[in-house]
Amino acid sequence: MKTKILMGLLAVAIAGLIAVPWIASYFYIFILTEILILGLFAASFNLIFGYTGMLSFGHAAFFGIGSYATALVLIHLEWPFLACLLVSMGASALLALVIGFLSVRLNEVYFAMLTLAFGMMVFAIAYQWRSVTNGSDGLAGFTLGSFGLGVDLILGNPAVYYHVVLVIVAIAAVVLYLICRSSFGMILKAIRQNPERVSFAGLNVRTYRLVAFVIAGSFAGLAGGLMAPFLRVASPELLHWSMSAEPVLMAILGGTGYFLGPFVGSAVFVLLETWITSFTESWMLVLGIILAMMVIFFRKGLLGTALDWWLEVKK
């Protein structure tokens, strides 16, 4: 029953998202573009947290590296945008492989602290390596050329770029969903519940954790590759440890037990932040209080709680 409800809501949501540029102003196009990108970022994090049970506090490292990779390729090589995104995924996957190889052997709080330490190291390198990253100013001044594959698109148009982001995020989400629903995804869930039993069954838990970590890193890099042209800059703030807290909040807020939960959490987070900043300078305090109340009273996340409420009403 929950699956049917989710599929119906998803169909309506996709139809609405496609129609946005024709019925909404540029302001809402920008907001929804940010929601889609951060939703993919949160969904990639949820692969290692919600499905594998690994809490990473350094996920922004892959998001930021993806943005820097796209910016650098656009500045120095002027490749098509699609090729830039592939480079961003590859660079983030490589970084995830290195960090994951050193981190997945640890569990729980030790894993979280080690990923935080690596994330801070990546931020420090980007902040101080001015000859490559331009330091605190970040990389700006790049322009989007062709999309690639012979497709002629004006990527500088916010409405066009929104549709490009929507298609890419939708494809990435389908791939992540298939991964989560596959036998590999089932093993990840088993590892989250009881890694010792999985190990006794003859499976290498560390290898599965590392593969999940690399996959999550590559999709976070894809989200970062989409974010750099959206912001028109790749800056160290995208690598900062505080940025790693956002996918954690979004996943928990939407519901880590549901694949679409991080996307719901991303929408609520961005909309709340936009609304609160419009009337108070103390937006972080107000947003923190609201998010804390939501987490306390919606134990299954907003999506899970809403689905349970709907099923109760239908009985």
Image (cartoon, helix red, strand yellow):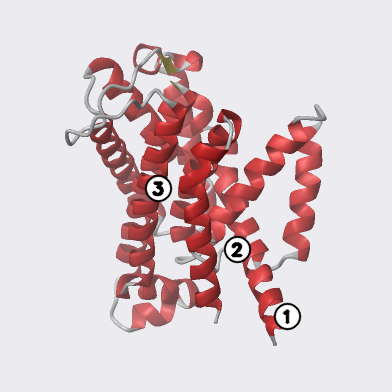
Q: Secondary structure at mark 2?
A: loop
Residue 55, placed above or below residue 311 = above
- In which quarter of the view is residue 139 placed? top left
Q: Are there few (<14), some (14-19), or many (20+) residues within 10 Å of tag 2?
A: many
Q: Can residue 154 be seen from the camera position used here? A: yes
Find the residue positioned furthest to the bottom.
Answer: 315
Residue linked to disc 1:
313
Asked if the residues shown at circle 1 and circle 3 are in contact, with their CB atoms under 8 angstroms apart, the answer is: no
Return the x and y of residue 37 as percentages of the image width and height: 47, 42
Marks 1 and 2, the one that precedes in the sequence: 2
| Along the line of sight, the residue nearer the viewer: 289 or 213 | 289
Residue 222, placed above or below residue 213 = above
Q: Can residue 58 be seen from the camera position used here? A: no
Q: Secondary structure at mark 1?
A: helix
| Along the line of sight, the residue nearer the viewer: 19 or 212 | 19
Question: Could you tell me the amino acid type at mark 1?
Answer: Val
Tell me the CA gap for discs 3 and 2: 19 Å
Return the x and y of residue 157 as percentages of the image width and height: 42, 25
Q: Secondary structure at mark 3?
A: helix
Question: Could you tell me the amino acid type at mark 2?
Answer: Gly
From the viewer's perspective, is 279 left or right of 299? Answer: right
Find the residue positioned furthest to the left.
Answer: 150
Residue at the spot x=81%, y=47% of the render? Answer: 289
Question: Could you tell me the amino acid type at mark 3?
Answer: Val
Return the x and y of residue 121 as percentages of the image width and height: 46, 32
Camera-side mark, 3 or 2: 3
Residue at the spot x=24%, y=29% of the render? Answer: 152
Residue linked to disc 2:
255
Q: Which mark is residue 169?
A: 3
Marks 3 and 2, the one that precedes in the sequence: 3
Return the x and y of residue 23 as percentages of the image width and height: 56, 39
Residue 58, placed above or below residue 253 = above
